[in-house]
């Protein structure tokens, strides 16, 4: 077991365990806090994959902005800390369990059985990755980049339309 | 890294540049003049859309790629024309509607332009990344438009349902796309096709990825085109949204979904047609049947049109499912899909315009309140009859020509049972369409509503255009057949078909 | 990968210290609750009314605006690393991106979403 594998197992356990905690808790607020842990685990996974910039962006944007937004949205709801008398799962949980297990087994089998074509060059260096990203945005992926800015603009308009105070 | 020829790129992307600039101008004018409610903003929007519409015709016959992933070919030109045309008609009817129901009208026009741009981007993407981003742009703009009437609970509910459903289906679709990327090492549709056209790959394990990836991606594509079982957002979203937005969702958004289906399946996965055609046949049957059966029991006009829209998506899908690669006549499925989309554009928009006009005048969308419409608004009632004839596929209307094309394609592909199911479903649909006609013509109007229904000129113009289009395609279909046959040229230029 | 080890160590140590402080406090500290001690602290006064007022939606709007402009800044980072190699066109491409978002910013400003009271 190399150090990298140990860290991977740790990150995976944190991510999956927090995700489990997130969906099993009765309080939406606690769920959002578990979600922050999930984002942290995913950031660690990004770093392990050599995408250091994306890992830091994950922490900055997902934990720093999106999780905060979700917490604000939760605080707008009437019962922030959850209803202790509410049923934990709704009545359809057996069917969902079956389907989710089926889907999971299918996807896991697919991923394990396939002979994936592997990349020829190794993982980029820390600054190399961000530089490649920058070059990509400005050349090959210029159109998705500009569409992303349109998407952000539309989101701005939407935020004002939906949430402005009258 | 190839150098970008900027002058050429700006020309190739002309309509999109016009739409972007127009949308920005409308936004700026809106906040500079502080909620102008006069004709300036709709006028600017109309000029933008009209300019983009006319410019789109100049690209017919090209086969170029702009900025590495925006295909400027006949398929894109077709959807540019369709999207801008749809939005012009929607604009004409939404001016009065938006002004009377909300305090802020300016952003609506800007969003209408952005959503048109999104439809075109979706139809033209030849790379999975751009495709996903454009898809999300279309979805998010639609969520905002559906939830436009902030003060109405139904509009909020519709937006939330639409958003939740859309977010999940989009996540599933992205997973499917990632499987394809993993197999091909590239997100470009052509590279995926190139990978799978290598005989060495076909006997390996990568082959097994395709069917699951296709089904996962169909979650997202099916959501946009409201295929069963991804249609469940449609009735609530259609009912709660402002009716012009519903009209746009039923035509423009759906057209974008079909554009994606055509482009992804034909460009990236033509060699797997055996697999995805079978899946599409199953979805087509499910969609047609369920849409029609549930429409039978509806009492709300918007919900009825929603389920009818779902069923129509099933018919359109039949064209793609029955696609015969070697057949370049009109009866290859793709021409059928495109022709049906044009026919459906005029017909469905027309029906919604009539519903909007009646809703603005009487405030109701319940079918029971349509009683006696022939006395209060004879022109509207007559137009609705024509649109229903077209939706049911009865000659001499556009719907008949569209259905002829897709059923003909199914027979041509020897999927006889599919065509039979389609015909049976069309017969069933006659019942619920003519239930409304019966209400309009043979039921006495409610006592107090005897004054004639008035509607603004713009709406009347849009209604007339839809009516003329519906009848024209039915009586003299040749120019529209030629337009749909641009699909043939698209097929001829596919590298790996 | 090696530079990240420092971050990982920092993270593990800070989590460990925080957890340890809380655990030690709850294990070894005295616990003798009285009703007075359990009431929320309000500088000696008895609290009146509920703790949670209806939260103004302004916070949510500010958080949304923050996300959008944060993402815009994120896009600036990789561009900043390469813009010198890309010449004028790189600058213009980023200016288009920024122009769209500046339009959005002015729109938000003029619509009064940035007013605090």
Image (tube, coloured by chain):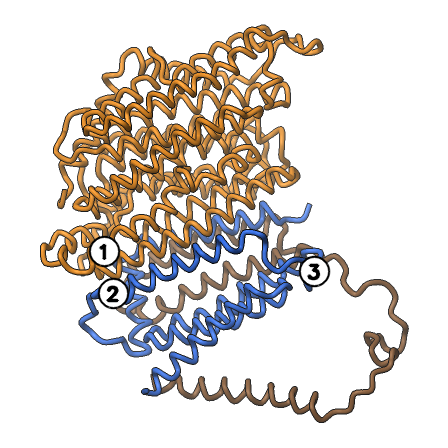
Chain colours: A blue, B orange, C brown
Horizontal and vertical percent position of residue A33: 58, 69
Side (left or right) of B335 relative to C65: left
Who is closer to the viewer here, B311 or C62?
A: B311
Point out the residue furthest to the left here: B199
Chain of the residue under label 2: A
The residue carrying mark 1 is B208
Q: Is there any visible trace of residue C10 in the rendered image? A: yes
Q: CA distance from mark 1 to mark 3?
A: 46 Å
Q: Secondary structure at mark 1?
A: helix
Marks 2 and 3 belong to one chain: yes
Q: Residue B70's x, y, as percent?
A: 26, 46
Q: Residues within 10 Å of mark 1 (few under 14, many from 20)?
A: some
Q: Which residue is mark 3?
A: A83
Is residue B241 positioned above or below B420 on the image? below
Please tell me if label 1 and label 3 are on a single chain: no
SS class, disc 2 = helix
Instruction: Mark yes or no: residue B11 visible.
Output: no
Answer whether labels 2 and 3 touch (C-beta < 8 Å).
no
Mark 2 vs mark 3: which is more N-terminal? 3
As drawn, which residue projects farthest toward the right? C45
For mark 2, what is the residue?
A113
Q: Is residue B328 left or right of residue A62?
A: left
Mark 1 touching mark 2, by CB under 8 A?
yes
Q: Pointer 1 indicates a residue of which chain?
A: B
Please name whichever residue, B46 or A60, is drawn nearer the observer in this view of the structure: A60
**SS class, disc 3:** loop
How far apart are the two marked residues, 2 and 3, measured between alpha carbons?
44 Å
Q: Chain of mark 3?
A: A
The number of numbered discs placed on residues in the rendered structure image is: 3
Seen at 55% across and 58% down, the residue is C65
């Amino acid at each position: 077991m190399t150090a990298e594998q140990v860290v991977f197992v740790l990150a995976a356990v944190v991510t999956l365990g927090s995700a489990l905690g997130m969906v099993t808790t009765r309080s939406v607020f606690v769920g959002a806090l578990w979600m922050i842990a999930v984002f942290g685990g995913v950031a660690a996974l990004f770093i392990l994959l050599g995408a250091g910039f994306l890992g830091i962006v994950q922490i900055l944007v997902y934990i720093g902005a999106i999780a905060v937004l979700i917490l604000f949205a939760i605080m707008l709801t009437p019962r922030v800390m959850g209803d202790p008398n509410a049923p934990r799962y709704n009545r359809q949980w057996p069917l969902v369990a079956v389907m989710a297990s089926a889907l999971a087994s299918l996807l896991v089998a697919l991923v394990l059985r396939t002979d994936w074509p592997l990349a020829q060059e190794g993982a980029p260096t820390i600054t190399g990755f961000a530089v490649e990203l920058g070059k990509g945005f400005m050349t090959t992926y210029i159109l998705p980049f500009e569409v992303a800015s349109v998407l952000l603009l539309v989101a701005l308009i939407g935020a004002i339309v939906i949430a402005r105070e009258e | 890294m190839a150098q970008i020829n900027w002058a050429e790129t700006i020309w190739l992307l002309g309509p999109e540049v016009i739409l972007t600039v127009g949308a920005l101008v409308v936004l700026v004018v809106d906040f500079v003049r502080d909620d102008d409610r006069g004709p300036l903003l709709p006028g600017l929007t109309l000029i933008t859309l009209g300019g983009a519409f006319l410019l789109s015709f100049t690209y017919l016959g090209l086969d170029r790629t702009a900025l590495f992933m925006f295909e400027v070919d006949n398929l894109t030109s077709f959807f540019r024309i369709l999207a801008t045309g749809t939005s012009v008609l929607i604009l004409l009817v939404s001016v009065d509607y938006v002004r009377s129901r909300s305090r802020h009208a300016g952003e609506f026009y800007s969003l209408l332009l952005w959503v048109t741009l999104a439809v075109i981007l979706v139809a033209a993407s030849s790379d999975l990344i751009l495709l996903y981003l454009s898809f999300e742009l279309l979805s998010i703009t639609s969520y905002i438009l559906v939830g436009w009437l902030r003060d109405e609970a139904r509009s909020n509910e519709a937006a939330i349902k639409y958003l939740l459903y859309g977010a999940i289906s989009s996540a599933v679709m992205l997973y499917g796309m990632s499987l394809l990327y993993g197999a091909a090492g590239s997100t470009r549709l052509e590279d995926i096709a190139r990978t799978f056209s290598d005989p060495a790959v076909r006997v390996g394990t990568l082959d097994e990825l395709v069917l699951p990836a296709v089904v996962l991606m169909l979650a997202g594509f099916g959501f946009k085109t409201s295929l069963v079982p991804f249609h469940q957002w449609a009735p609530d979203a259609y009912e709660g949204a402002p009716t012009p937005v519903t009209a746009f969702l039923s035509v423009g958004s759906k057209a974008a979904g079909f554009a994606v289906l055509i482009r992804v399946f034909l460009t990236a996965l033509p060699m797997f047609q055996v697999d995805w055609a079978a899946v599409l046949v199953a979805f087509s049957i499910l969609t047609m049947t369920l849409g029609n059966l549930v429409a039978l029991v509806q009492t709300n006009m918007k919900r009825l049109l929603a389920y009818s829209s779902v069923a129509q998506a099933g018919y359109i899908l039949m064209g793609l499912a029955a696609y015969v690669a070697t057949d370049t006549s009109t009866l290859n499925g793709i021409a059928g899909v495109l022709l049906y989309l044009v026919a459906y554009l005029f017909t469905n928009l027309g029906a919604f315009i009539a519903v909007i006009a009646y809703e603005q005048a009487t405030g109701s969308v319940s079918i029971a309140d349509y009683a006696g419409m022939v006395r209060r608004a004879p022109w509207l009632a007559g137009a609705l009859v024509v649109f229903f004839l077209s939706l049911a596929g009865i000659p001499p209307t556009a719907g008949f020509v569209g259905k002829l094309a897709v059923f003909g394609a199914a027979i041509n592909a020897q999927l006889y049972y599919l065509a039979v199911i389609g015909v049976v479903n069309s017969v069933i649909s006659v019942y619920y369409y003519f239930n409304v006609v019966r209400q309009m013509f043979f039921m006495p109007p409610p006592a107090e509503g005897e004054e004639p229904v008035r509607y603004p000129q713009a709406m009347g113009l849009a209604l007339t255009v839809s009516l003329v289009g519906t009848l024209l395609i039915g009586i003299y279909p040749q120019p529209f057949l030629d337009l749909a046959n641009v699909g043939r040229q698209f097929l001829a230029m596919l590298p790996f078909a | 990968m090696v530079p990240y080890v420092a971050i990982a160590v920092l993270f593990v140590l800070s989590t460990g210290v925080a957890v340890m402080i809380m655990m030690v406090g709850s294990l070894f500290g005295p616990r003798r609750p009285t009703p007075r001690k359990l009431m929320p602290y309000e500088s000696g006064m008895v609290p009146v009314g509920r703790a949670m007022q209806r939260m103004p939606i302004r916070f949510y709007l500010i958080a949304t605006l923050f996300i959008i402009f944060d993402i815009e800044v994120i896009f600036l980072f990789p561009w900043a690393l390469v813009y010198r190699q890309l010449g004028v066109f790189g600058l213009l491409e980023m200016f288009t991106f920024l122009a769209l978002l500046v339009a959005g910013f002015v729109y938000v400003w003029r619509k009064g979403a940035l007013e605090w009271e």
